[in-house]
Image: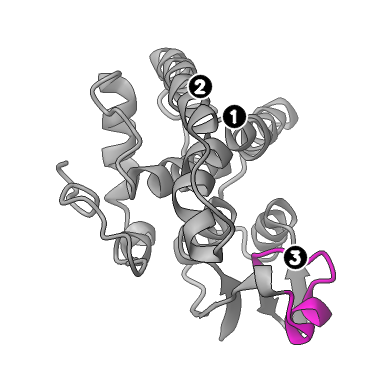
């Protein structure tokens, strides 16, 4: 069995969890308080970040590299298309959510409202929260534009791009920071992806001190 050192609301950990579940790889989840920088964890990943996956006798870090490794070792069901240009588009969107979306939205909302309290590093910065609330509207509109032209975010088939986006949005949805009424296309896309069996363990997450809203695990919102 694989072992994943993770934090429940980390979108990077959730992306790896979704890939593991979609490929039906059994995994033991270990909640890792990476911010404590304990020596045992730093030996697994000197960068001091989650996720860290123990699989096939190897220690793997960095979510994008982990997901690509899983795709190469377990290609069924596929989460990357075959054509080079299509694969580029998936990677572009994964980077979009894990870099731009993360920096503009996730850090300003989730990290301010949850991580600071959990890690004991202070109180939310109101300016950052305001900026995140503004930025997420732009990103939801961009997703709506993509979905107006495609069945899934990167093309006609579900891919890692969808899992990257869903990982971030599900973390934010846990704290009610997503306006699902802004776009019917995005809401339908999320309902479709969160109804997949791979999403079950994520929808069962509960973070102490932060109860999820009633709609969080409701497949019909």
Residue contact at pointers 1 and 2, CB within 8 angstroms: yes
What quarter of the picture does the N terminus occupy?
Answer: bottom right
- In-image side of 176 versus 149 (left or right): left
Q: Nearer the viewer, mark 2 or mark 3?
A: 2
Label 2, label 3: how far apart the Cα atoms are: 29 Å
Q: Name the residue under label 1.
A: 104
- Whichever of callouts 1 and 2 sits on the residue coming sooner in the sequence is 1
Q: Where are the magenta residues, as a range?
A: 37-51
Residue 195 in sight from this viewpoint: yes
Q: Mark 2 points at which residue?
A: 135
User: Residue visible at 52% across and 24% down?
Assistant: 131
Near mark 1 (Cα within 10 A), the count class, few <14, some 14-19 or many ≥20, is some
Q: Is the magenta stretch mostly helix, strand or loop?
A: loop
Helix, strand or loop under label 2: helix
- In-image side of 148 versus 185 (left or right): right
Q: Which of marks 3 and 1 is in front?
A: 1
């Amino acid at each position: 069995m694989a072992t994943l050192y993770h934090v429940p609301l980390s979108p990077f950990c959730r992306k790896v969890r979704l890939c593991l579940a979609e490929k039906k790889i059994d995994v033991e989840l270990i909640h890792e308080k990476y911010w404590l920088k304990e020596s045992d964890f730093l030996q697994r990943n000197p960068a001091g970040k989650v996720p860290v996956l123990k699989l096939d006798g190897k220690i793997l870090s960095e979510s994008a590299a982990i997901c690509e490794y899983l795709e190469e070792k377990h290609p069924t069901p596929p989460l990357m298309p075959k054509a080079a240009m299509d694969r580029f588009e998936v990677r572009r969107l994964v980077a979009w959510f894990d870099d731009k979306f993360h920096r503009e939205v996730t850090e300003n909302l989730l990290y301010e409202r949850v991580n600071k309290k959990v890690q004991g590093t202070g109180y939310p910065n109101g300016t950052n929260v305001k900026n995140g609330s503004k930025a997420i509207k732009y990103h939801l509109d961009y997703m709506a534009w993509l979905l107006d032209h495609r069945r899934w975010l990167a093309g006609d088939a579900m891919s890692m791009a969808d899992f990257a986006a869903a990982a971030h949005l599900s973390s934010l949805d846990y704290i009610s920071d997503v306006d699902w009424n802004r776009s019917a296309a995005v809401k339908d896309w999320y309902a479709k992806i969160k109804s997949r069996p791979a999403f079950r363990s994520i929808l069962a997450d509960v973070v102490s001190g932060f109860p999820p809203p009633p709609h969080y695990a409701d497949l019909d919102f």
